[in-house]
């Protein structure tokens, strides 16, 4: 790859949402419950293939978390991306099922790499990262709904985790049994509730086209996800079921007992999903990047989303989903963007009260958002689950076109106002370790357990 020109950012979409993502892969380990029908077993992290880009990078570095983070930082720097604000993503398996010692060491090594120094304890590494050059502003852990107990949640909070992605796939016990998923819908409901009450941002992985489902069922499931208050995730990854080498599904396919959706069927389904997605949810990704060598049946079109969104824009469909509206990505195809903004509030029920605060313009372009929750069990408990300013990521201390212009402060002030009006005397924020200094400037303090940033009124 040729080095970028002065001022040029290669692959600009990597940081157009306001942060620099750094994905770190776990060493391979079999799932305790067994293997799902669709999941390949190929001596690499579960559900991945040896030629998946993230696996190839991790293999070269012997799955060492310190080396992986360092390598990703170097790659981002070569492409001229700012690396002050890092979103750390732990991927490759059910992290919370690994030995506890491995978990703590893995997370500490990630912070050590960001800090460019080795620490004796995780707490020391986190403390240093508060003012480090590469600050962890968000940390994402993937887990299963049945590996998300109160103890697991306490541990994730100690790690500095702010976002959890649940492998939901479907919300149908019959399908779960057919695909040998190893849990029920009840575990999905319980995990979602625990995570939400603890303040996490929640993502679901869903898989339309599973054995036992059909397009009608998939649409009904999607509608239920956003109509039933036991669910209502903040984010989604939509991975239509594909037949991969090394999976039990491969045998069923060759016997003529299973066929995945065609490209056109997937396209029609995704369009329907996008139209049904509420404004408080972000569809993070559509389609998995499965190398063609390992794809037995299913579309190879990993760029299908781009084509779908271009079609929706031409038809001027009003899609409310966050990624479709966010300023950084929107500015790539819309020349005239109104910079006059207003604060919009969407209130919805999710076993408690959720306030989705947005900074938007007249074209409904999204500049920034805040998720405030009032828990149902304890009416005196208010927590901010997310504060995010979109647009091209810039270095801390610099002013950009969108970032560092006071949108975050404006949203926090509104969240505080709502909290006070409800007679609540304290507001908590689940904060990435690298954002603590920002909240301190707004009058927040780290609580005694060194988990949440808190302000009392």
Image (cartoon, grey):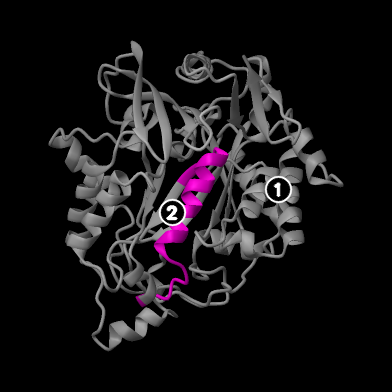
Q: Please state the horizontal and vertical placement of residue 6, each as a whole percent of the image.
A: 54, 28
* Vertical relation: 387 (above or below) 174: above
Left or right, 329 with reference to 24:
left
CA–CA distance in space, label 2 to label 1: 31 Å
In magenta stretch: residue 193: yes
Regarding residue 247, the answer to whether it shows in the image is: yes
Give the mark nearer the N terminus: 2 vs 1. Answer: 1
The percent coordinates of residue 95 (x first, y second) are 61, 59
Residue found farthest to the right? 120
The residue nearer to you, when weighing 457 against 147, is 457
**Residue 200 at least partly seen:** no
Q: Residue at x 52, y 77 (%)?
A: 34
- State the predominant SS element of the stretch in magenta: helix
Element assignment for label 2: helix
Q: Residue 317 carries which label?
A: none
Q: Please state which of the two labelled residues, at mark 2 or mark 1, is closer to the viewer.
A: 2
Residue 232 in magenta? no
Residue at 27% across, 73% down = 212
Q: Give the range drawn in magenta.
A: 178-202
Q: Which of 12 and 310 is in front in this view?
A: 310
Q: In which quarter of the image is residue 435?
A: top right
Q: Residue 26 location in percent, x, y?
A: 63, 61
> Above or below — where is 49 with respect to 11?
below
In percent of width and height, residue 346 lies at 34, 26
Judging by the rendered image, the residue that carries numbered circle 1 is 110
Residue position marked by numbered label 2 in the rendering: 189
Quadrant location, the C terminus: top right
Residue 291 against residue 200 in the figure, above or below: below
Label 1 sits on a secondary structure element that is helix
Frontmost residue, 266 versus 399: 266
Going 31% across and 52% down the picture, which residue do you hit?
Answer: 303
């Amino acid at each position: 790859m040729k080095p970028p020109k002065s001022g040029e950012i290669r692959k600009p979409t990597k940081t157009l949402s306001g942060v620099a993502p750094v994905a770190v892969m776990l060493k391979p380990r079999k799932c305790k419950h067994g293997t799902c029908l669709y999941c390949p077993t190929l001596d690499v992290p579960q559900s991945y293939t040896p030629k998946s880009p993230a696996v190839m990078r991790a293999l070269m570095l012997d799955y060492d978390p310190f080396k992986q983070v360092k390598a990703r930082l170097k790659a981002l720097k070569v492409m001229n991306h700012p690396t002050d604000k890092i979103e750390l993503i732990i991927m490759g398996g059910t992290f919370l099922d690994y030995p506890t010692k491995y978990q703590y060491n893995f997370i500490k090594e990630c912070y050590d790499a960001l800090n460019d120094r080795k620490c004796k304890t995780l707490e020391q590494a986190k403390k240093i990262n508060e003012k480090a050059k590469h600050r962890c502003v968000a940390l994402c852990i993937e887990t299963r709904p049945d590996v998300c107990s109160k103890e697991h949640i306490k541990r994730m909070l100690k790690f500095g985790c702010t976002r959890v992605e649940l492998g939901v796939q479907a919300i149908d016990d019959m399908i779960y049994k057919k695909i040998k998923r190893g849990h029920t819908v009840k575990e999905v409901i319980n995990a979602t509730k625990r995570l939400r009450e603890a303040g996490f941002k929640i993502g679901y992985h869903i898989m339309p086209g599973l054995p036992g489902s059909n397009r009608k069922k998939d649409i009904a499931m999607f509608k239920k996800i956003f109509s039933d208050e036991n669910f209502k995730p903040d984010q989604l990854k939509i991975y239509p079921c594909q037949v991969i080498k090394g999976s039990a599904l491969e045998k069923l396919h060759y016997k003529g007992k299973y066929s995945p959706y065609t490209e056109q069927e997937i396209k029609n389904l995704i369009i329907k999903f996008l139209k049904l997605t509420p404004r408080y949810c972000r569809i993070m990704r559509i389609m998995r990047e499965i190398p063609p060598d390992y794809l037995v049946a299913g579309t190879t079109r990993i760029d299908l989303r781009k084509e779908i969104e271009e079609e929706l824009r031409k038809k001027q469909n009003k899609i409310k989903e966050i990624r479709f509206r966010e300023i950084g990505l929107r500015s790539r195809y819309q020349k005239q963007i109104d910079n006059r903004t207003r604060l919009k509030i969407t209130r919805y029920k999710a076993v408690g009260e959720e306030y989705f605060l947005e900074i938007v313009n007249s074209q409904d372009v999204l500049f920034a958002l805040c998720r405030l929750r009032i828990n149902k069990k304890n009416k005196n408990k208010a927590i901010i689950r997310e504060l995010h300013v979109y647009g091209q990521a810039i270095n801390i201390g610099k002013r950009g076109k969108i970032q560092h212009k006071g949108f975050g402060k404006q949203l926090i002030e509104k969240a505080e106002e709502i909290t006070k009006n409800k007679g609540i005397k304290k507001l908590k924020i689940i904060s990435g370790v690298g954002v603590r200094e920002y909240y301190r400037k707004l009058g927040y303090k780290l609580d005694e357990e060194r988990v949440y940033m808190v302000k009392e009124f």
